[in-house]
């Protein structure tokens, strides 16, 4: 079988420009080429799952599921235990709740509960629609729930290069990995390595921009208003360091501490609701492990403890905006 | 397809191994050697063993919180099972599972789920994998009458039927979901009728008759191997003990003492099969030898389990991950804090 990389007629070390969504598809194609145990399953996936994948791999590698999120998730887990490496596409992140019993009670626990007799190499994908009048049942960002579950790895990369490298790591991983894609990032373009062995390890944060005055940790789609805010602040001579954790479980504590050791100031920006979110965890980690590094209190920006509204008028400032972020940075200076 | 020749003695042997294991387990539980709760399969041995004997060694299985009988029925060694009940390092799950989770992968079990109905999708996926990989393997899925009312039952049977998966759904219908009877919880108490809704055969068998269960399971296995898809088998059986050992049910009894005693007296699957075997001309001495052997195997399992050390506290995180995160900076810090 011709490898996906050859399609681009590229040599190792070459890069091509593609969108986040294209990079995600490319990662899956490369891994399906590399390992015949990898297959896709999800609702309407043979229609919406990326034409290239369906054409290339055919029906035995791409499985349309009935609307039974709870049990087709379990079906994927059973298949993973018995020799396959499923990519379960749960499409909209709110459907993760339907799948959560099987993800939590089975996928995350079976290895431990059987004393290591069983492995569950499986990837669960879902996308988070924030902004766009989807209303509360199609707009959730439920990653904090799953962070509280031992045994799961969780990634939410923000660039085309990162989604490609981390998705490949997720597919190759021997344990359950959840992938939260923010649809705000889908159209973003960037340089992506064409090397099929280009992978990014799970658990490593990335310094998106170096700075010295304030550290911002930005999660998933929050990276976009964060970068806009940081550009605006730079014009005023305020230097912000931006960290993208890329992986939410396990969080790269060292990356946060290294940055705060320079700046002494920390803001966490994300689109999940405010109570017990990633920001809560990072703030707690800093207080417990690096209190002396902090010159000012840790600030968290997130969605309020209110459901996502439908009307554009209500939704407009629901998530942290460039202006909110600029204001938070100023509060710390 | 009847149990024949040595298979008949094997059926008797496995049922007895379950019975003696459970009886000894309850003694050990009473004596404080087994922590947690103890869910015995006494009374349900024929439903388990009859189905297991229709499988090959490399066929797969999923079970339930009433998990002790399944591995024994599939041929597992008793030592590591008893050690697991005692929470020992030598346990089949290294002391991470316990009474509700005696999954022994070496005999093909991928899960014993204490979430009722939780194993049904897993079995379906296990069979899905066999089909996708074109492997000659069937999966036997045990669940109880309570699980039939979970959404996973409906969703999974539908998927298995759509893709004609090689899976056998075997309902150990003991009549009660803890204390809730079929009449109280099933709009259609004839569980096998549900199969029609998924376009698969549904059969009801006397779950106290190991031969009847075997026949139905063997037929379903043949069908599954031929690519004709799943079957739902309802084995009507009875739990002789409480839901879990020592459970005290407040208020009016949910089943009468007479009902329980009548089942123990007239419907004991081991007593029934012993009579059948003698009628078929099996020498009583060979049955006595099997009985002695089962008792000896259980004694040895208890010795092994008692001698096995408790897991060392520092092994707490072991077996969490295949791709280890033990060295990750977040993981280390959290452990230290605990």
Image (cartoon, rainbow, N blue to C red):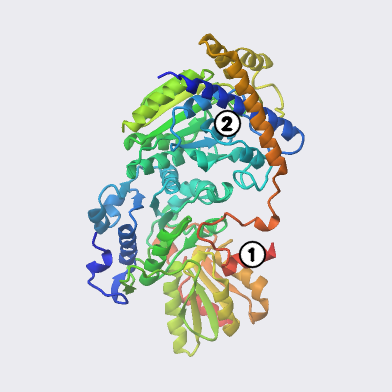
- Dot 1 falls on a residue whose secondary structure is helix
Q: Are marks 1 and 2 on the same chain?
A: yes
- Whether A221 is drawn above or below B57: the answer is below
Instruction: Please give left or right for residue B216 compared with residue B10 in the image.
Output: left
> Which quadrant of the figure contains the N terminus of chain A?
bottom left
Q: What is the CA distance from the residue labelled 1 to the residue labelled 2? A: 38 Å
Question: Most extreme residue toward the top, as rendered?
Answer: B279
Percent x, y of residue A211: 50, 85
Mark 2 belongs to which subunit?
B
Instruction: Please give left or right for residue A35 compared with residue A290 in the image.
Output: left
Percent x, y of residue A326: 50, 79
The residue closer to the viewer here, A97 or A311, is A97
Percent x, y of residue B78: 61, 36
Q: Is residue B49 visible?
A: yes
- Whether A122 is drawn above or below A285: the answer is above
Percent x, y of residue A308: 46, 58
- Whether A125 is drawn above or below A223: the answer is above
Residue marked by disc 2 = B69
- Dot 2 falls on a residue whose secondary structure is helix
> Residue at the spot x=53%, y=9% of the render?
B279
Instruction: Please give left or right for residue B39 compared with residue A236 in the image.
Output: right
Question: Which label lies toward us, 1 or 2?
Answer: 2
- Whether B226 is drawn above or below B321: the answer is above
The residue closer to the viewer here, B298 or A188, is B298
Mark 1 belongs to which subunit?
B
Is there CB contact under 8 Å for labels 1 and 2? no
> Residue at the spot x=40%, y=63% of the render?
A167
Residue marked by disc 1 = B334
Q: Earlier in the sequence, mark 1 or mark 2?
A: 2
Q: Is residue B189 visible?
A: no
State which quadrant residue A261 falls in.
Answer: bottom right
Circle 1 packing at 10 Å, graded few (<14), some (14-19), many (20+), is: few
């Amino acid at each position: 079988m011709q490898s996906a990389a050859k399609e681009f007629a590229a040599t190792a070390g070459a890069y091509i420009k593609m969108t986040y969504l294209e990079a995600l598809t490319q990662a899956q194609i490369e891994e399906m080429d590399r390992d015949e145990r990898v297959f896709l399953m999800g609702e309407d996936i043979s229609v919406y799952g990326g034409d290239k994948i369906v054409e290339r791999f055919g029906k035995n590698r791409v499985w349309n599921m009935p609307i039974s999120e709870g049990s087709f998730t379990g079906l994927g887990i059973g298949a993973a235990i018995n020799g396959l490496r499923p990519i379960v596409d749960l499409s909209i992140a709110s459907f993760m709740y339907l799948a959560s019993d099987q993800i939590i009670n089975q996928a995350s626990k079976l290895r431990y509960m059987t004393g290591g007799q069983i492995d569950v190499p499986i990837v669960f994908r879902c996308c988070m629609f924030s902004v766009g009048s989807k209303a509360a049942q199609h707009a959730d960002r439920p990653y904090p729930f799953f962070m509280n579950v031992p045994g799961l790895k969780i990634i939410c990369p923000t660039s085309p290069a990162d989604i490609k490298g981390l998705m490949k790591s997720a597919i190759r991983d021997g344990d359950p990995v959840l992938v939260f894609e923010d649809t705000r990032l889908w159209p973003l373009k960037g340089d992506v390595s064409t090397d099929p062995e280009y992978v990014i390890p799970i658990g490593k944060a990335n310094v998106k921009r170096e700075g010295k005055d304030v550290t911002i940790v930005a999660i998933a789609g929050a990276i976009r208003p964060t970068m806009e805010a940081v550009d605006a602040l730079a014009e005023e001579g305020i230097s912000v360091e931006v960290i993208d954790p890329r992986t939410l479980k396990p969080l790269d504590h060292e990356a946060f501490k290294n940055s705060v050791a320079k700046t002494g100031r920390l803001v966490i920006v994300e689109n999940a609701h405010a109570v017990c979110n990633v920001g809560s965890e990072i703030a707690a980690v800093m207080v417990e492990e690096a209190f002396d590094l902090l010159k000012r209190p840790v600030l968290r920006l997130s969605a309020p403890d209110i459901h996502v509204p439908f009307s554009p008028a209500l939704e407009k400032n629901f998530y942290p905006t460039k202006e909110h972020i600029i204001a938070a940075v100023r509060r710390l200076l | 397809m009847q149990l024949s020749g040595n298979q008949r003695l094997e059926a008797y042997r496995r049922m007895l191994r379950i019975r003696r294991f459970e009886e000894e387990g309850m003694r050990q539980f009473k004596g404080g050697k087994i922590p947690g709760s103890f869910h015995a399969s006494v009374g349900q041995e024929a439903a388990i063993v009859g189905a297991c004997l229709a499988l090959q060694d490399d066929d797969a299985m999923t079970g339930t919180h009433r998990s002790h009988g399944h591995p024994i029925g599939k041929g597992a060694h008793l030592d590591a099972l008893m050690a697991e009940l005692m929470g020992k390092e030598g346990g089949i799950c290294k002391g991470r599972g316990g009474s509700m989770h005696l999954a022994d992968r070496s005999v093909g079990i991928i899960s014993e789920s204490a979430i009722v109905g939780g194993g049904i999708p897993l079995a379906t996926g296990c069979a899905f994998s066999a089909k996708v990989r074109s492997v000659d393997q069937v999966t036997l899925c045990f669940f109880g009458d309570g699980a039939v009312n979970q959404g996973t039952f409906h969703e999974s049977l539908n998927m298995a039927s759509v893709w004609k998966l090689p899976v056998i759904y075997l309902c150990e219908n003991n009549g009660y979901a803890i204390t809730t009877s079929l009449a109280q919880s099933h709009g259609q108490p004839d569980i096998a009728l549900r199969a029609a809704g998924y376009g698969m055969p549904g059969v009801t068998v006397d779950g106290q008759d190991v031969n009847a269960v075997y026949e139905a399971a063997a037929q379903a296995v043949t069908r599954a191997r031929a690519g004709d898809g799943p079957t739902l088998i309802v084995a009507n059986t009875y739990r002789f003990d409480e839901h879990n050992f020592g459970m005290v049910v407040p208020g009016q009894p949910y089943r009468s003492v007479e009902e329980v005693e009548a089942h123990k007296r007239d419907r004991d699957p081991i007593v029934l099969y012993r009579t059948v075997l003698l009628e078929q001309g099996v020498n009583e001495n060979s049955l006595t030898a099997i009985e002695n052997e089962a008792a000896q195997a259980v004694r040895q399992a208890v010795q092994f389990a008692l001698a096995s050390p408790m897991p060392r506290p520092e092994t707490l995180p072991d077996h969490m991950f295949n791709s280890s995160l033990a060295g990750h900076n977040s993981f280390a810090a959290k452990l230290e804090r605990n």
